[in-house]
C-alpha cells in the first residue's frame, strides 16, 4: 500500500489525500457526484483498495469484477496521473496514465457510466478508446 501521507491527492484535485479521497474510500464521506466517485476510484487503484472498488461497482455488474483481478491490475501497474476529459451528471471521460508491469507507459482512456441509487454513486460500466 502506498503512503497515505502523500501531500497531494492522487486524483488531481490539488487537496491532500486525507482531505480528498481518503475519507470517501474509508466510508467517512460519500462521493457527492459521479466525478468525485470516479476520482476516488482512481485513488483506490493507486492505493490498492480493492474492497472499495468492488463496493462502488453497481450490484448488477459486480459479478464481472473479481476482487483478485482488480487487486492484481491495481498492484501490477504504477499509476502516474489522472486526466479528466469531460464530465456530465452520469458520465466521466478520463485518461489514466500508468506504467504497466513491463514499465511501458500506457493510457487507459474510458468513458465511464455511473448511477445514483439510494444516495450513493456507483460505477456501472465503461466504453474504452
Image: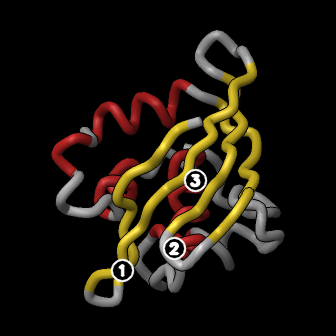
* Sequence-first tag of 2 and 3: 2
Depth-wise, is mark 3 or mark 1 nearer the camera?
1
* Viewport quadrant of the C terminus: top right
Q: Is residue 14 left or right of residue 84?
A: right
The answer to whether mark 1 and mark 2 are in CB contact below 8 A is yes
Depth-wise, is mark 2 or mark 3 nearer the camera?
2
Residue 87 occupies which quadrant of the picture? Answer: bottom right
Q: Residues within 10 Å of mark 1 (few under 14, many from 20)?
A: some
How far apart, in angstroms, are the residues tagged by discs 3 and 1?
Answer: 18 Å
How far apart, in angstroms, are the residues tagged by discs 1 and 2?
Answer: 8 Å
Query: Residue 42: which disc?
Result: 3
User: Badge 2 is on which residue?
Assistant: 34
Q: Is residue 42 left or right of residue 5?
A: left
Residue 15 location in percent, x, y?
A: 78, 74
User: Badge 1 is on which residue?
Assistant: 116
Q: Secondary structure at mark 2?
A: helix
Say which of 28 and 58 sits in front: 58
Q: Residue at x 34, y 59 (%)?
A: 124
Where 111 falls versus 32 (above or below)?
above
Amino acid at each position: 500500500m502506498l503512503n497515505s501521507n502523500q501531500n497531494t491527492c492522487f486524483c488531481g484535485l490539488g487537496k491532500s489525500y486525507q482531505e480528498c479521497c481518503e475519507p470517501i474510500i474509508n466510508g467517512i464521506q460519500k462521493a457527492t457526484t459521479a466525478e468525485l466517485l470516479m476520482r476516488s476510484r482512481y485513488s483506490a487503484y493507486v492505493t490498492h483498495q480493492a474492497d472499495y472498488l468492488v463496493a462502488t461497482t453497481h450490484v448488477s455488474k459486480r459479478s464481472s469484477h473479481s476482487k483478485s483481478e482488480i487487486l492484481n491490475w491495481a498492484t501490477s501497474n504504477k499509476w502516474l496521473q489522472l486526466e479528466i476529459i469531460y464530465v456530465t451528471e452520469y458520465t466521466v471521460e478520463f485518461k489514466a496514465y500508468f506504467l504497466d508491469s513491463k514499465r511501458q507507459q500506457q493510457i487507459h482512456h474510458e468513458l465511464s457510466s455511473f448511477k445514483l441509487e439510494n444516495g450513493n454513486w456507483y460505477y456501472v460500466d465503461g466504453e474504452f478508446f
